[in-house]
Image: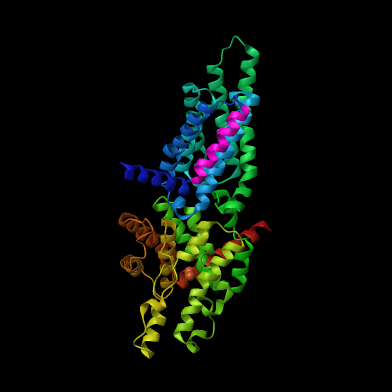
Amino acid sequence: MFNEMRKSLENLLRLFSNKWYIFISQAFVLFFMKYSLYFLNIERSIVEYLMLVSLVFITCELGISKVRFFKLHRSYVFTFYSILTVGMILNSLSYSYFGYPGISIFLPVSLITILMGTTAGISSTYYFSLSSAIILNYSLKYSLFFLFVGSLTVFLTRRINKRIDIARAAIFVSLLQAVLFAINENFFIPISTYTNIVRGFLNPILSSIITIGILPYIEYGSRIYSSIGMLELGNLSHPLLKQLSIKAPGTYYHSVILANLAEAAAEKIEVNPILARVGSYFHDIGKMKKPEFFIENQQLENPHSSLHPSLSHIVLNFHVKAGSELARKYRLPLLIEDIIKQHHGVRIQKFFYHKAKEVNPEVKEEDFRYPGPKPQFKEAGIIMLADSIEAAIRSIKDPTPSKIEEMVTEIVNDIYNERELDESGLTLKDLELIIEEFVRVLVSTYHQRIEYPREETKNNLVTLKESIEDESEHNK
Ligand SMILES: [Fe+2]
Ligand SMILES: [Fe+2]
């Protein structure tokens, strides 16, 4: 009996030390709720505090535990709970001044959805709608109201690529709020009714202005990027990409081709194509520190021929380390830094391993591995596959569709059998679809060159030139 009590107390302490941010954030939330709403009643406060903490575990912890990125980076957890806490505090204060039309569920829910996806957005909606009931004296009516408005916010902001999309979503939510207030209010008290309808309508629109304005600050601070921020990074005018195009043009070209492959495959298996594209642009950014050591940038001689294989191994690993350092320095998204570290996984640098083995048969595979870790999410897995395929396709002479398909299947099989994709979440069905998509993109890129022989192209050009001359004659 005593032992069991001690064990449960230990478990409670462990829970508190692991999830301290939940207990502290809810204490803040309750303090501001009390400060702005009620006079202090200790008994009631303790009960409400326990209700809020339980609510977080039921709505948020259950939801976000299913999202992979929350397990990979603490920044996701802290940003999520910071938005949740600040959102609740602002709502408590706003409620005390403007009544329930002052509560904005749009601001926190849209921020969480845009930055962390639909599951996190839905979890925060449940939390806000149920905790709003605590603010509003346990009114189920308002809980349902916020659940409705929050769900619409998640639905409208789940695939935002442009700033204007946020404003558009806010207008729809504003209209919904105004209509719901109008239906709900007592029309015999016109002044308060119309004031509430106007407040309910303006609230999401004003919230959207704050969302748009605050987004870059959250992105910079947390290194969690929305698709809007990600697209800005991927417009090829980023200083790192410009430097890469000058210092390592071969790598730059390789990254652009890779981006097309990875984006198409990500779309096919319904993961984030923007992350796949932008991640590809930056995946080899570390190569610009020593560009001449990588085959795509070599013109005359290969500096590896005069290097000991173990030194070549250090140089190869250096591009991963230098890349992740640059990602931190330029505050690139955490997921892009992950892609830089994971795009070679812990694969063996076979060429240098075999070269070293010729000199010393005792040499171990472990000494010629990339530092890793293995890809931890699907987009990183896709980039690993596309990276090897893009490098290999250039070595095929006269690439026919069957040669391309054979090569793609072989490379995907090799990487799968090396167990590099074990932690990426990619299923066999995903791999099948990825192979199909890679082959489709590569065939459409390379096969055209075979379909149209030089003579025909030349003839087409002559015809084009003639028709331009004819037209200019005609215009005279
Ligand atoms: Fe690389
Ligand atoms: Fe690469």
Q: Nearer the viewer, residue 231 or 290?
A: 290
Say above or below: 416 vs 82.
Answer: below
Residue 431 in view, yes or no: yes
Residue 466 in view, yes or no: no
Task: Look at the image and tell me in which quarter the C terminus lies.
Answer: bottom right
Q: Nearer the viewer, residue 221 or 133?
A: 133
Rendered residue at 42%/59% (across/down):
376
Magenta segment includes 24: yes
Q: Position of residue 404 (x, y in %)?
A: 36, 68
Residue located farthest toward the right when viewing the structure as drawn: 476
| Colouring method of the image | rainbow
Q: Position of residue 94 (x, y in %)?
A: 63, 29
Magenta segment includes 428: no
The magenta region covers: 20-36
Say above or below: 399 vs 113.
Answer: below
Rendered residue at 41%/74% (across/down):
369
Q: Main secondary structure of the magenta part?
A: helix
Task: Look at the image and tell me in which quarter the N terminus lies.
Answer: top left
Quarter holding residue 239? bottom right
